[in-house]
Image (cartoon, rainbow, N blue to C red):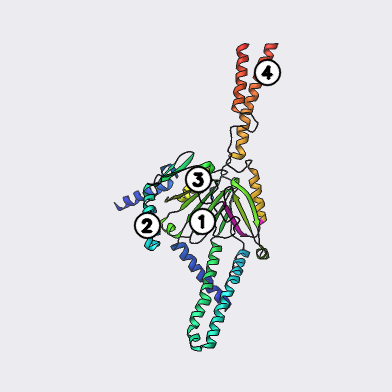
Amino acid sequence: MVTILAIKTIRCIIARRMTPFDPSTIERPDRALMKYYIITALLTGPLSILVILPLFFKYETLRYRFDAEGMSMSWGILMRREIYITYRRIQDIHLTRNIIQRWLGLATISIQTASGSSSPEMSVEGILEADALRDFLYTKMRGAREHHEAAPDATGTAPHDEALALLREIRDLLRARHS
Amino acid sequence: MSRNVERAASWMYRGVWGVLTRWFRVPQHSPTLPTLPGEQLQSFRPSEGFLRYLKLQFWLTILPAEAFIVIAWSSLTAVRPWIGIWLTPVALVLGTLPQALSYLAIHLRYDTTWYVLSQRSLRIRSGIWTIHEATITFENIQNVTVESGPIERCFGIGNVIIDTAGGSSSSGHSHSKGSSNLHRGEIAGVANASEIRQMILSRLSLSKVAGLGDEESATTASGWTAEHLAALREIRDTLQAGS
């Protein structure tokens, strides 16, 4: 009985390890984020009550959505905010972990585009697979893939050839008509 | 004697390092970047000179405080010997403990700083309490600066500062370490700063884009767009129909 249980748990762990990271399954922050918010609020001492309320509402309303082109994040009760960033416009990805976040297994991923502010456009909090998410974003961001060396050749030659073929056909048609 | 002290210090340091990695979850290994097959990663730390430079900087800032403690204690002892003797432990602690802690902090800072370069991007990790990892692809870099002050040049080190597009912090060209300018990556305290800059620039020049969000656009390199092709096809079809 015990061995079966152990095998089952091991299989479960292996399955979780083996499944590739899929960000589109992420919708809500992990519960550890609320713990983190509570701890940070407690650290402010007497102001805890004032600090915890907005953080609690942020945690409760925080939603993530990752699609093929970009990601969005929305939160807020009175002031509702929704940010959408296309992956290709990401300029820098910053991953910060302070000591409490490390204990809870959390991280903040700050994502920046080329806008005028020096504060991040989006701070993704409360995701346990922060490293995987960061690497996912990295592979989607500009300049992380081969396409810029390969793409001009690939997309540049194919239409060119088609154009050449078309021109030859037109030439042949004209020749046939004139002869 | 001094060798024993050194050995004890290294043991203590190892102990602190163990506590940090176990209890404070400081990562032990250098950061990595997802790589394409055949891509090489280059990870390095600041040079030894950076450590010496940080220590010198520390001594220069701490000396006035030390001098103040010594002068205050000795003058007090001269005027009121009893109070002076009572205060000796306090003065000793004040004079040595912060230094030891700062030395520790300097070593930890040095040991937790990592720079990783791949063919397309770089990642910088720094910090002890708050570990910060910045990832920038070369394609997004706008300019690369090499800076080194006179003392830094004595130690043979320089800083490579990498800027991406976007606003900087309000203080403009600030050098403060705590400035939260996220559009900037700093490879601080490396011996081959200009080499690194050349390497980054050469990899940057491989990409043909201007650096701001221009993607593979509708126009192809040869100037033929889909519309040109459509027009050509129409011509052919009209010819075919006519013949």
Q: Quadrant of residue B161?
A: bottom right
Q: Chain of mark 1?
A: B
**Amino acid type shown at disc 4:** Arg
Give the left or right position of residue B14, taking residue A41 as reference: right
Label 4 sits on a secondary structure element that is helix
Asked whether B175 falls inside the magenta stretch, the response is: yes
**Amino acid type shown at disc 2:** Leu
Q: Chain of mark 2?
A: A
Asked whether B2 falls inside the magenta stretch, the response is: no
Q: Quadrant of residue A154?
A: top right
- Residue under numbered circle 3: A137
- Residue under numbered circle 2: A50
In the rendered image, residue B92, in percent from the top left (x then y), is placed at 51, 79
Magenta part of the chain = B167-193
Give the Cα distance between marks 1 and 4.
63 Å
Q: Are marks 3 and 2 in contact (CB under 8 Å)?
A: no
- Residue under numbered circle 1: B132
